[in-house]
Amino acid sequence: MSQSHLVLARKYRPQCFKDVVHQEVPINALRNALKHNRVGHAYIFFGPRGVGKTTIARILAKRLNCEHPIENEPCNECHSCIEIIRGISSDVIEIDAATNRKIDNIRDLKESVQFSPMGGKFKVYIIDEFHMLTTEAFNALLKTLEEPPSHVVFVLATTDLHKVPETILSRCQDFVFQKVSTDLLEEYIEKLCKIENYEYDKEGLYWIAKKGDGSVRDTLSFMEQAVTFTDGKLTGNLIGKMIGYRGIELFQNLLKSILEDESSNKLMEILESVFVDGNDLKKFLWDFLDFVHSSVLLKEGIVSKENINFSIEDSNKMQKTVNNYRMESLLLISERVYNMYDKLINARLRNSYEIKVFLEIYFRKLYLDINKPSLAGVLAKIEELGELVQKDLNNLPIIKEENNLEQKPTIIPTDVEGSIKDKFSGVEVDEYPDID
Ligand SMILES: [Zn+2]
């Protein structure tokens, strides 16, 4: 983690409830509790990483101890607020349960709980990664959670609620924190770009928000890196280069070669070129899977910014071409490619050449399975062939034998034999060894 990376995330860490992105549900509940003087003694904040759990816990701690609160917000100017902002308040105790998970750590905590707050009115214990505590530590904490001194508030933050024992859950009020949508993250970082005077475009904001994956903290971390990489020009083009976005042309061609080509030659050529260009073949396979899966979602009309990983411009292109293909084919390809990926990551292949061979084998099988005719198709071909043979036989010259009897030859002449082969040439029977 670079120093510069910390700057944006720290600089824009919300100091008031109103500045937190999203999370209206827990914030409104806390505001109501503050308004009616009914703040609980133990809260569980559950939600994904980087969405504001610790930030809101600190704002709550400030508001509880603030000397001049402004309605339900802390003033951020009094002695107590300043100490908490600086992280030097003895009344706000932050514990990382990932590294302080043992019963001894909880015994220390239980002792410290008994002492009154030094400066403010409340001692606030913020325990991060709460689910990491040992069973003994959970049990040791139970009694304290049940009857805590009136000056104590616990905020237990966790990303894994199901790992917290029921006995603990029943003694706490729990709040669920949600991932932040890509739209909201884009809106938020656009404001920051304006404040910081960064150049940007819509596509650039989209990629930064996508990389954040619902987390404000991760979005700001990535934005920090992007600012360095692009020299403050947060455009889709530059950020695309930074993250190695290759566009969809290659995947469009690959899909076309599977679904439209007469033979698998083009498909093999594409795989060869991906190998020769030195691409990461595992990533290539995953990206192709993502492309086909996104095509399915587009065809179903249920695609959104959250569930697609392609640029806005490319998504529009995909939308136009996806209607050329049948849903069944796309579903079959996505399922097969997923299985292929699963096999690949578990296969003990030593180098990219071996992966290339693997891909060629499985893609060729996929091509054959997609293009093998249906039973109805084979029957139609046979019927067509029967008619052709009959027609050819009817057209054969009549051979007069010595005994003057008219007789049709019993051996099919070579030209008819040739046309039978031609008729069957389009029918590829699945003789490929089953390698599933
Ligand atoms: Zn204050």
Image (spheres, helix red, strand yellow):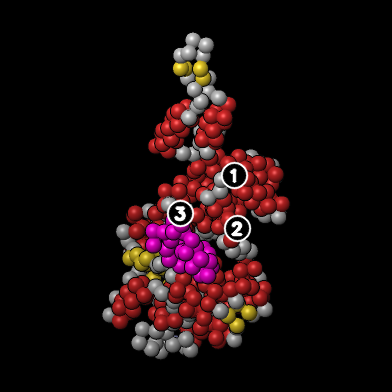
Q: Is residue 334 visible?
A: yes
Q: Which residue is mark 3?
A: 325
For mark 2, give the secondary structure: helix
**Residue 7 position within the rendered picture, expressed as x and y whole percent measured from the top left:** 60, 78
Main SS of the magenta part reads helix
Q: Amino acid at mark 1?
A: Ser
Disc 1 element: loop
Magenta region:
296-325
Disc number placed over residue 264 in the picture, else none: 1
Quarter that holds the N terminus: bottom right
Kindly identify the amino acid type of the residue bearing the numbered disc 2.
Leu
Give the alpha-carbon distance from disc 2 to disc 3, as whole Å. 17 Å
Return the mark for residue 250: 2
Q: Earlier in the sequence, mark 2 or mark 3?
A: 2
* Left or right of 147 in this view: 307: right
Q: Residues within 10 Å of mark 3 (few under 14, many from 20)?
A: some
The percent coordinates of residue 288 (x first, y second) are: 55, 54
**In the image, is residue 299 part of the stretch drawn in magenta?**
yes
Which residue is depicted at the point 51% across and 25% down?
Answer: 397
Q: Residue at image x 35%, y 69%?
A: 41
**What residue is drawn where x is 57% and y is 30%?**
415
Mark number for residue 418?
Answer: none
Residue 61 location, x and y as percent? 43, 77
Residue 53 seen in this snapshot = no
State the image quarter where residue 218 is shown: bottom right
